[in-house]
Image: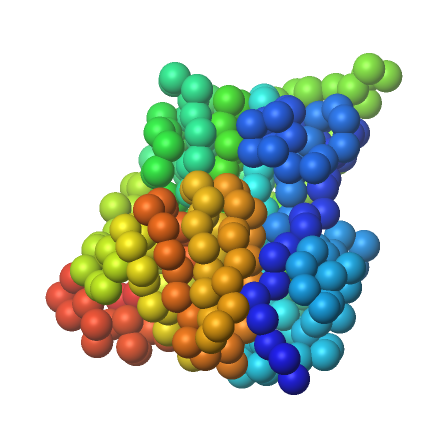
Amino acid sequence: MDLYPLLMTPHFIHGAVTPWGGCALRDIFMKEAPEGNIGASLEVSVMEGQESMVSNGPHAGKSLPRMVELWGEALTGPIAGGFPLLLKLLDAESDLSVQVHPGDDYAREHENSSGKSMAWVILNAEPGASIVYGMDAEGADLKQLVAEGRVADHLRRVNVQPGDVYHIPAGMIHALGGGIQAYELAENSDLAYRLYDWDRADAQGNKRALHVEKALDVADPGLKLDKNEGTTVLCKGGSVTYYISDEHFELARLNLSGKMPLETDRMLILTPMSPCELKWGDETMEVPTFATVVVPAALADVTLVGNTKVLMASLPDRAKLRDLLGYRAENVAGLVD
């Protein structure tokens, strides 16, 4: 089995499905995307009908699910169930609907699916751009607010800037605001319960469906978090800032300034902010700006080379990270119970 890093071609979500989408993924992020409004590029996806594809090497043209079949745990490392992660880039020209995701227990019982915990990294944001991040509804009953049409009055808006990181656990009421491009890492699930959609209607006057009853079942309106500052550890070739390590995924930023060896005891998903090189054995590949590469868990002797920031997603090894960070583990979302 000749393992190598997989450079991915994303699947695009666009048109009527993402009326809030813009053109940044095509015109700024230089994705080979369709014309019109593009809401999301699914950089790493095994979702049926929305699979990302390999664009390099002997397996170019194969889907990511096919690579999981071919390489198994040599690609993913030990996993329980199917491929566990979903990675998107989002372009919000206008506000997304206000949503909430269920946890795993509720999702298995009611949807025969995993739940959805996720995170956002803000890549670009117009001045004054904001997200919905929880609610300001002390003492209020969410069901009553919905019945009275007053949800929008109690949404907690948070202004954002490029580089901000937000953990969005199941139960968090949230919405990406207009004028923002973001990196979204999540459990492999498309479950989203739409609580409110700004009273928008299409050209025929039709409003998008809401999922109010299920949203009320799983929402935690008292859940309030702040952006995650993370904690940084120096290493050969730069440093690593760890932001999130919950039971579903780990999110870090590699601050690359030279040659950085990577530990590949688990699958790594890398997205650089500007071009860099990836070396393994005697091989080298260039990873373009905002492209995504999947590094197999069993691939040895892997090094990143360059001067840039690289977002890195992986499955968590929380015990190992707690040992590495010591008392600073409390600065990493989800790491300390």
Q: Position of residue 139 (x, y in %)?
A: 36, 37
Task: Tell whether 223 sits left or right of 38.
Answer: left
Q: Which residue of the protein is positioned furthest toward the right in this rendering?
A: 204
How many numbered marks appear?
0
Residue 302 appears in the figure? yes
Residue 227 pos. (x, y %) = 31, 41
| Left or right: 296 as drawn, with respect to 275 | right
232 or 337: nearer the viewer: 232
In the figure, 137 relative to 278: above or below? Answer: above
Q: Is residue 78 above or below residue 241?
A: below
Compared to residue 273, the image places residue 285 above or below, namely below
**Furthest-left residue in this view:** 327
**Identity of the residue drawn at 33% across and 46% down:** 307
**Residue at left offset 48%, top offset 72%:** 282
Q: Say which quarter of the image contains residue 260.
A: bottom left
Image-quadrant location for residue 81: bottom right
- Give the quadrant of the C terminus: bottom left
Location of the N terminus (image quadrant) = bottom right
Residue 83 lies, in percent from the top left, at: 63, 70
Q: Is residue 50 above or below residue 261?
A: above
Instruction: Name which residue lies at 21% across and 76% down.
Output: 323
Residue 311 shown left or right of residue 80 in the figure: left
Which residue is more in the foreground, 196 or 182?
A: 182
Query: In the drawing, does residue 218 fall left or right of residue 274?
Result: right
Residue 151 rendering spot, x and y as whole percentages: 52, 28
Identify the coloring: rainbow
Whether residue 213 is visible? no
Q: Residue at x 34, y 68 (%)?
A: 261
